[in-house]
Image (cartoon, rainbow, N blue to C red):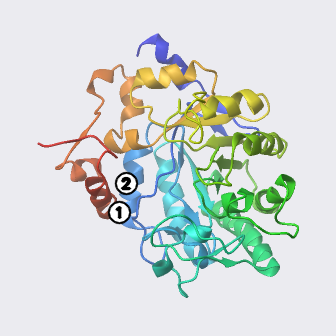
Amino acid sequence: MSSKYNPFFEGFTFKSGVRLENRILMAPMTNFASEENGVVSDEELVYYKERSGGVGAVVTAVAYVIRGGKGFINQIGAESDDKIPGLKRLADTIKGEGAKAILQIFHAGRMAPPELLEDGQSVSASAVAAPRPGLVTPRELTETEIEEIIQAFGDAARRAIQAGFDGVEIHGANTYLIQQFFSPHSNRRTDKWGGTIEKRMAFPLAVIDSVKAAVKEHAKDPFVIGYRISPEEMENPGITMDDTLPFVDTLAEQELDYLSVSVQDFWQGSIRDEQDKKSRVLLIHERVGNKVPVIGVGSLYTPEDVKKAFDTGVPLLALGRELIIEPKWVQKVEAGETGTIATSLTKDDQGRLKVPDVLWSTIMKTPGWFPVEDK
């Protein structure tokens, strides 16, 4: 291995005490591979086993914390205790290959497709429709329902602990329910859950407190609590960096193990202002990186891409699509075999890469998502 890649393979210890063997994680990616009822499937285990051998940690595809928060077909469920055995199989599979296992948890809110919900009715902070085709106007959550969902996040964290995971990542990004409470587009409430930026922070902070309480009560070993955030929204009114920077200041005081910044490209500037070219990942790292570790992600394909990102001082990086194309990315860098790292797919690669059927179909139907060669 070239010495310039040495920073990839330095160990890292979170505030909680959980230690990673290296600084590269597998990013959370929906894989559409669980059973219809949310139980982890054999197909899903094969997919994760193939990708867990080199990275320091795997952040799983997102799991819903209540049935009404389901956001995808064939999605992992963490909403009831009968899911614990399947979750344990998943944690054991990831950890058996040497990586730490982190379960991402969420509620889809108004982004839940109505056909996946038992009553066809999504919910959110307010009855404001998402500007996306195929979605219904959500019903505004009652105070009681808000408290129940907050508790459901804590219950899901408890199930992750009982299943043997090393941590959970609270999914506060990508326009889902936690972000919906923070967003001035989707949250028009006038009670304690909405209005000022401080009140729009109340739900995310209550979720964090619920998870922390579950960890304090149930975890016997160090346990990671991470939080994923989207820096901006396209909508008007929507989340801007003037909202996000005070929010990350507050998040940095919550004793979290990390903040993961959800963007399509590590170097991506503002999605609201074409003139603002500053990387959102770096803005957040520069703001709070001295208090809470930041995980960067986004279009980091080659070892040189990853080295350039590490050179900024961001301590942890996550690879997503790169690990679908090349499951042995980390091992090949460590072995000095960077020239053999795959950078594209062929239509015949599904079996070799152990990609679940629905995910593979989605890849093949989504132009530009992956480089696909006609071979």
The residue carrying pointer 2 sits among few (fewer than 14), some (14 to 19) or many (20 or more) residues within 10 Å by Cα, namely some
If the image is split into quadrants, where does the N terminus sit?
top left
Give the left or right position of residue 182, taking residue 194 as reference.
left
Residue drawn at x 52%, y 54% is 60
**Residue found at the far top of this picture:** 3
Residue drawn at x 78%, y 28% is 290
Q: Position of residue 68 (x, y in %)?
A: 60, 78
Question: Which picture quadrant has residue 174?
Answer: bottom right
| Helix, strand or loop status at disc 2 | helix
If the image is split into quadrants, where does the C terminus sit?
top left
Residue position marked by numbered label 2 in the rendering:
47
Q: Is residue 105 visible?
A: yes
Q: Position of residue 173 (x, y in %)?
A: 62, 53
Residue drawn at x 64%, y 62% is 160
Vertical order, 97 against 140 (above or below): above
Q: Nearer the viewer, residue 270 or 8?
A: 270
The amino acid beneath tag 2 is: Tyr
**Residue found at the far bottom of this picture:** 119
The residue carrying pointer 1 sits among few (fewer than 14), some (14 to 19) or many (20 or more) residues within 10 Å by Cα, namely some
Q: Position of residue 335 (x, y in %)?
A: 37, 22
Vertical order, 226 against 187 (above or below): above
Q: Nearer the viewer, residue 338 or 132?
A: 132
Q: Are marks 2 and 1 in contact (CB under 8 Å)?
A: yes
Q: Nearer the viewer, residue 61 or 263?
A: 263
Give the left or right position of residue 92, taking residue 350 as reference.
right
Q: CA distance from mark 2 to mark 1?
A: 6 Å
Question: Which picture quadrant has residue 262?
Answer: top right
Q: Is residue 216 visible?
A: no
The disc at residue 8 is none
The amino acid beneath tag 1 is: Glu
Give the left or right position of residue 195, taking residue 180 as reference.
right
Residue position marked by numbered label 1 in the rendering:
43
